[in-house]
Image (tube, rainbow, N blue to C red):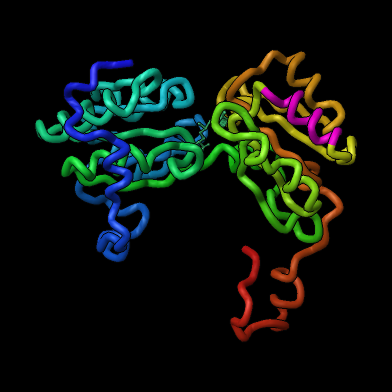
Amino acid sequence: MTDDSDAETDPQDAIDAVATDRDDRVYDHSAGDEQKGIPFVGAGPGDPKLLTVAGRDLLADADLVVHAGSLVNSELLDEYCADAETVSSIGKDLEELIPLMRDAYEAGDTVVRLHSGDPAIYGAALEQMDALEHEGVPTYIVPGVTSAFAASATMRTQLTLNEVANHVAFTRPQGKTLTEEEDHISEFVGMGDVTTCIYLGTHAVAETMERLLEDGHDPETPVAAVYHASWPDEDVIEGTIGTIGEKVEEAGYRASAMVIIGDAVGGEDYERSFLYGEWASGGSSDGSQEADD
Ligand SMILES: C[S@@+](CC[C@H](N)C(=O)[O-])C[C@H]1O[C@@H](n2cnc3c(N)ncnc32)[C@H](O)[C@@H]1O
């Protein structure tokens, strides 16, 4: 536990105090606009090239970058904000992080909070933003490439695939945060046409697959575990519900992999889409339904 004497507000009070009315900034700005305050920037999956241009420009101006530790590639920090002070958020609680960012911002420093992937996915960004806003520091989000998208690019497939996968679930397994009842992986897999992307589950691949087998799912269902997608040591492990647990354990990975379950993993047995078929030749030009892109 860190000394919280510098925090003016309990972060939970800030969350509880969030106004129910929509903030005007929602209508006045678009994602990617530079705004007043501290940007919460998605660093992307690892490769510095997969940071957005908006994120790169913000980092170039930063005096202080508070980043997500080992999930943010140090090469990205070296390349885009070599002159900034960089601080890892690992091991710091809100009581330490909020005053750190607030004080630097109030002292006139340009502060960037750098999350891995996209801050909107398992990023715990909003509680930091609300705590800062509660203390008068404006904040906003700059999106990034989430690791599921990097992993699907690595696998050279789509997460949605005509006649194979109509839906995508971003999920995580039961553990400290989720109870057994809140773990919906088995339900997603049972739906059949869902690609299930498991974050924060590398250490528990074998147990997760065991549960799927106990629930009667087809052991031949394809699964890929992409370790460190887009990093120089990226590794792709392919298998099935029946085999992937052992393969990941053999490889020794306990963190930093994206586990993707479903037929879309193989990128095969799909049907051509309407986009380059009937619709392209004028079959549906009345705008009544959105075309795939
Ligand atoms: C705390 S979550 C953060 C997710 C992040 N906000 C995102 O959008 O990718 C961390 C988990 O994301 C996944 N992850 C993050 N970066 C990854 C990468 N480069 N390759 C594979 N999985 C990654 C892993 O499952 C890891 O346990």
Magenta residues, as a range?
Answer: 204-214
Task: Tell me which corner region of the image, top left, top right, bottom left or bottom right, holds residue 184.
Answer: top right
- Relative height, residue 32 to residue 235 (above, below): below
Q: Is residue 122 visible?
A: yes
Q: Is residue 29 visible?
A: no
Q: Among all residues in the image, which is located at the extreme bottom?
A: 286
Q: How many marks?
A: 0
Left or right side of 56 for 99:
left
Q: Residue at x 62, y 63 (%)?
A: 293
Task: Tell me which corner region of the image, top left, top right, bottom left or bottom right, holds residue 42.
Answer: top left
Residue 249 part of the magenta-drawn span: no
- Relative height, residue 75 to residue 172 (above, below): above
Q: Residue at x 59, y 81 (%)?
A: 287
- Relative height, residue 1 to residue 200 (above, below): above
Q: Residue at x 31, y 27 (%)?
A: 66
How far across and how far down the image is residue 55, in percent? 35, 41
Task: Tell me which corner region of the image, top left, top right, bottom left or bottom right, holds residue 137.
Answer: top left
Residue 211 part of the magenta-drawn span: yes
